[in-house]
Image: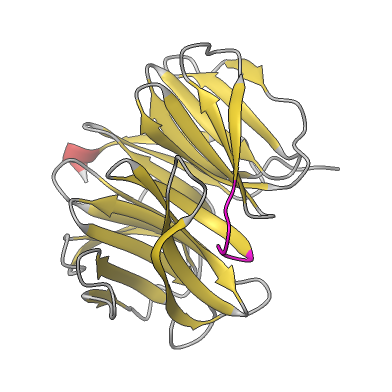
Amino acid sequence: KEYPWYQSIVVFSNKIFVIDSSVSKVRIHGLQDGRLLYESDRLKSTPMAVCLINDSEIAVVLKNSVIKIMSTHDTPVIRWTRDLRVRGGLDRYHGVVSFDGDLVVCGVKENTVCWCIVSSNDRRVVGTIHQICKAKSWSLSYITAKHNIIYISCDFDSPDTGVYAYDVQNPSKYKYSYKHTDLKGPTGISIDHRASLFVCNYIPYSCIHHLTSECQLVSIIRWGIPYRPLAIFCDDRRLYVTCWWSNHITTYRTHYL
């Protein structure tokens, strides 16, 4: 049996866009009632993450380092407009976020978890590839951004597990980091309009870590969090959270957290 695996989520224009990695499809749900509006054909490689580029385009990164771009004008129908096969990029993609007209991706290159900026127009890496630390075969990372700071959550099952924040203007070393004894399995990460950072975690128990933009702990949210939260997205008022092996999407009002 194939269990749904909603690995990444973004909300836009009263629709929820999710990646179902279990069947390699992109799905669109209605925001008000959660009804499935449309799903893509099965993709040739496993989709790993989705992000909004601008009001007209959404990016989906595939595990084989291809970035597929879809138009938002045709939704709920999914129409792919172009593919980006990045020259000199990462070996395997995990996460993606839009940044200043380009895309920032995180993933693995030569057994090291890295991140880099990818031009959304001419298929090249902008600047250099920045290393975080050594990866394991199953290492997973997610990414978000606010202003000039890139935030990456890294699940290594090692002392390096945690959240790392990089200043794009000076990215040689991380600017902030966050590690915690209760953050052994960080997955999805998202930042809201107030620069509050939220990180999903599934080991040693299911919770969401609420951080400041400087990666200082505000609170650990345990009540009402679904079992093994996986992906998260923040808008102005709500958090949208998925969990492992489920097609359920849980919403929270952020002013109650």
From the top left corner, tell me how far across and down residue 230 is, in percent.
Answer: 52, 52
Q: Considering only vertical position in the picture, is 177 above or below 106?
A: below
99 or 181, nearer to the observer: 99
**Quarter of the figure with the N terminus:** top right
Query: What residue sits 75% from the left and 26% below the top?
Result: 41
Query: What residue sits 17% from the left and 40% below the top?
Result: 193
From the top left corner, tell me how far across and down residue 133 is, in percent.
Answer: 47, 83
223 or 231, nearer to the observer: 231
Dividing the picture into quadrants, the one containing residue 42 is top right
Q: Count numbered badges in the picture.
A: 0
Horizontally, residue 65 falls left or right of residue 209, namely right
From this viewpoint, is residue 34 visible?
yes
Q: Considering only vertical position in the picture, is 145 above or below 26?
A: below
Range of the magenta residues? 85-91
From the top left corner, tell me how far across and down residue 111 is, in percent.
Answer: 62, 80
From this viewpoint, is residue 222 visible?
no
Query: What residue sits 73% from the left and 40% below the top?
Result: 24
202 or 116, nearer to the observer: 116
Asked if residue 60 is among those painted magenta in the image, a careful observer would answer no
